[in-house]
Image: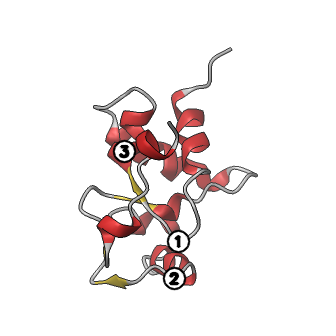
Amino acid sequence: MTDSFFQKVYNVTKLVPHGRVTTYGAIARFIGSPQSSRMVGWALNNCHHLEEFIPAHRVVNRNGMLSGKHHFGNPSIMQQLLENEGVEITNDHIVNFDKLFWNPSVELK
């Protein structure tokens, strides 16, 4: 049986290393649905009720912005989680985004 779209998103998101970030689009491209960035966001918004930990805080928009921060119960939680991993954030933007970007299409070849 093949994994559902949401499960594919979760499987990739679980692989994002501590202290690194990826994007909704990078995940969508990796799982073969390049036009589904928004669906990746919906999947991650849905993961908070799961028993297993999905590090959704490590997924940001294509510009390195914390666009999903309002889905963590408190808008500062996403930033706090990333900062706890050593990620520097200024004005809801990942500092050194290009350096911290983890691309599953490259990293998981």
Corner quadrant of residue 40: top left
Secondary structure, mark 1, is loop
Mark pair 2, 3: CA separation: 22 Å
Is disc 2 in contact with disc 3, using a CB cutoff of under 8 Å?
Answer: no
Mark pair 2, 1: CA separation: 6 Å
Give the tally of numbered discs: 3
Sequence-wise, the earlier of marks 2 and 1 is 1
Q: Residue furthest right?
A: 51
Sequence-wise, the earlier of marks 2 and 3 is 3
| Quadrant assignment for the N terminus | top right
**Mark 2 highlights which residue?**
86
Is disc 2 in contact with disc 1, using a CB cutoff of under 8 Å?
Answer: yes
**Where residue 64 sits: x, y (%)?**
30, 65
Q: Residue furthest left?
A: 63
Corner quadrant of residue 35: top left
Residue 60 seen in the figure? yes
**Where residue 42 sits: x, y (%)?**
44, 44
Crowding near pointer 2: few (<14 within 10 Å), some, many (20+)?
A: few
Secondary structure, mark 2, is loop
Return the mark for residue 26.
Answer: 3
Q: Is residue 19 placed above or below 108 in the rendered structure?
A: below
**Mark 1 highlights which residue?**
19
Q: Is residue 91 placed above or below 40 in the rendered structure?
A: below
Which colour assignment does the render follow? secondary structure
> Seen in the image, is 51 located left or right of residue 17?
right
Question: Residue 7 or 29: which is nearer the viewer?
Answer: 29
Residue at 31 percent across and 31 percent down: it is 34
Tell me the amino acid under the disc marked 1.
Gly
Mark pair 1, 3: CA separation: 17 Å
Tell me the amino acid under the disc marked 3.
Ala
Tell me the amino acid under the disc marked 2.
Gly
